[in-house]
Image (tube, rainbow, N blue to C red):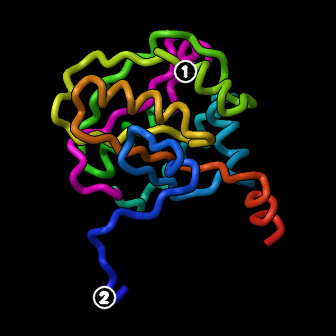
Amino acid sequence: MPGADNSQPPPLCGRCVRRPPPFAASHSPLIYSHPLDRLIQRYKHHGDLVCENALEQLLAGMPLPWPDTDVLCAVPAHWRRRWWRGFDQSQRLATRLSLLWQRPLLPALLRQHATASQQGLKRTQRERNLRRAFQCVTPVTGLTITLIDDVMTTGSSARAASRTLIDAGAHQVHVWTLARTLPHKHTLDAHNG
């Protein structure tokens, strides 16, 4: 936009104004609604790795929103969940984005507690569920990190993982998720519009 002041940070949502997150920014290029929600659910919860090919097609032209990123880091699943599913979808997503964006992938986080599934939990339940869930296991001092996950719902996982990285010395954390859920009203509008 001509004459626009690009030095100003993008506007924050009301929730982030009231309670600023530890991450500097988040980006989700897609909305978590039909048919993408079904595709991600089949991939994530039913181990349908064929769905991964469709997701890769969606990733093909997506640019890295923060060129100053030093490394990518996946929001890890607990080892029990990885064992049960047979894979870690965020790790696989981060691996593909690492190749696409030509940034190293740093396995800096460990999920140290087997937390209950976040699906269906309210925001406060999600936050309580994730207290001390992550541990930083590699040096991150001074790094600008883009944290990778598949879906952002309330941002509780992103907040907890980002806080762990910042507390361990990361310079800045950005959060990139493939899709973002919208408040129920917006989801209905998307289906009807």
Residue at (62%, 32%) from the top-left corner? 44
Residue at the outermost bottom position = 2
Residue at (49%, 46%) from the top-left corner? 177
Is residue 17 located in the magenta-colored stretch of the structure? no
Residue 17 in picture, x, y percent from top left = 50, 51
Determine which of the numbered discs, if any, sits on residue 130 in the image. 1
Query: Which stretch appears magenta?
Result: 65-89
The amino acid pointed to by label 2 is: Gly
Asked if labels 2 and 1 touch by Cβ distance under 8 angstroms, the answer is: no
Disc 2 crowd, CA 10 A, few/some/many (<14, 14-19, 20+): few
- Does 140 appear above or below 136? below
In the image, 3 versus 83, the foreground residue is 3
Is residue 67 located in the magenta-colored stretch of the structure? yes
- Does 162 appear above or below 70? above
- For marks 1 and 2, the one nearer the N-term is 2
Q: Which residue is mark 2?
A: 3
Determine which of the numbered discs, if any, sits on residue 156 in the image. none
The reply, left or right, for residue 166 in relation to residue 192 is left
Residue 125 in picture, x, y percent from top left = 67, 24
- What's the CA distance linking mark 1 and mark 2? 43 Å
In the image, 9 versus 47, the foreground residue is 9
- Does 93 appear above or below 161? below
Residue 157 in picture, x, y percent from top left = 52, 31
The amino acid pointed to by label 1 is: Leu
Q: Is residue 70 visible?
A: yes
Residue at the outermost left position = 142
In the image, 71 versus 99, the foreground residue is 71
The reply, left or right, for residue 193 in relation to residue 85 is right
- Does 156 appear above or below 172? above
Residue 18 in picture, x, y percent from top left = 53, 47
